[in-house]
Amino acid sequence: MSIIASISCSLAVQRHDKNLKGMAVRFEEKIVLVTGATGALGSAVTARFLGRGARVAAVARDPGRLAGLATTPRLKTFAADVTDAEAVERLFIDVQHQLGAVDILIHTVGGYQGGQYLQDIAVPDWRRMMDLNLNAAFYCAKHALAHMAAKGGKIITISALAAIEVKSKRAAYIVAKSGLIALTRAIA
């Protein structure tokens, strides 16, 4: 995520909080799963939900970076590569056992590895962009929906302006982020 996107997200959260001042928006009974929890946006989302009383399942690939998150009884950390469908299945089983069924999924995982025209993209690079920016969200949403079937819930995904401001030199990224928007609409 770019610094500008991180700042924009942070400012949006701050404006939202100011608009809610005086309102008791709390999440004591909620279990929130945050993917990409050690990234700029993911760590801010994790801290915000902890501050609002939620029990948070913080997910990231690197266990070492997870150790750097605030310690509180309401925070459980899970090392998992959400681009791996089987790892996501195990993740949701582990979260269910340790915290209960997920009420809110906030998927902040994504990435950009430089722009190329479609004809210049190597197949492994194409797959990596799809895995990071689309497939991971699908795997997580699929399992979250199964947990949410009985009691409802919320799924929040993070796309990018590039999905609607198409530039041909970012083909793989644009396709993946556009697909993420379509996936989110299909879930709704």
Image: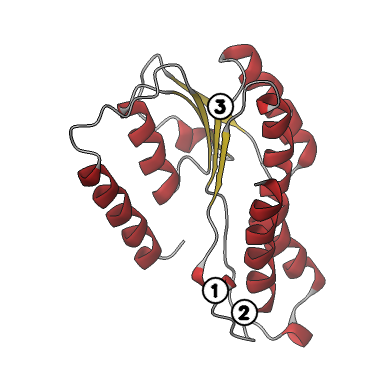
Which type of secondary structure does the marked residue at label 3 adopt?
A: loop
Circle 3 residue = 103
Question: Mark 1, mark 2: which one is toward the viewer?
Answer: 1
Task: From the top left corner, tell me how far across and down residue 28 is, in percent.
Answer: 39, 18
Q: What is the quadrant of residue 185 in the picture?
A: bottom right
Residue placed most toward the observer, 91 or 13:
13
Task: From the top left corner, tell me how far across and down residue 125 is, in percent.
Answer: 73, 69
Q: CA distance from mark 3 to mark 2?
A: 34 Å
Q: Residue at x 57, y 56 (%)?
A: 110
Q: Is residue 77 above or below residue 161?
A: above
Mark 3 Cα-neighbour bin, 10 Å: few <14, some 14–19, many ≥20: many
Q: CA distance from mark 1 to mark 2?
A: 8 Å
Mark 1 or mark 2: whose residue is earlier in sequence: 1
Mark 2 Cα-neighbour bin, 10 Å: few <14, some 14–19, many ≥20: some
Mark 1 Cα-neighbour bin, 10 Å: few <14, some 14–19, many ≥20: some
Q: Amino acid at mark 1?
A: Ala
Task: From the top left corner, tell me how far across and down residue 154 is, in percent.
Answer: 56, 36
Q: Amino acid at mark 2?
A: Arg
Circle 2 residue = 170
Left/right placement of residue 149 relative to residue 115 reads right
Q: Are marks 1 and 2 in contact (CB under 8 Å)?
A: yes
Q: Residue at x 35, y 21 (%)?
A: 53
Q: Residue at x 79, y 35 (%)?
A: 86
Q: Is residue 146 above or below residue 19?
A: above
Circle 1 residue = 162
Q: Residue at x 65, y 67 (%)?
A: 178
Q: What is the quadrant of residue 50 in the picture?
A: top left
**How many numbered markers are drawn?**
3
Left/right placement of residue 16 relative to residue 132 reads left
Mark 1 or mark 3: whose residue is earlier in sequence: 3
Task: From the top left corner, tell me how far across and down residue 71 is, in percent.
Answer: 36, 21
Q: Amino acid at mark 3?
A: Asp
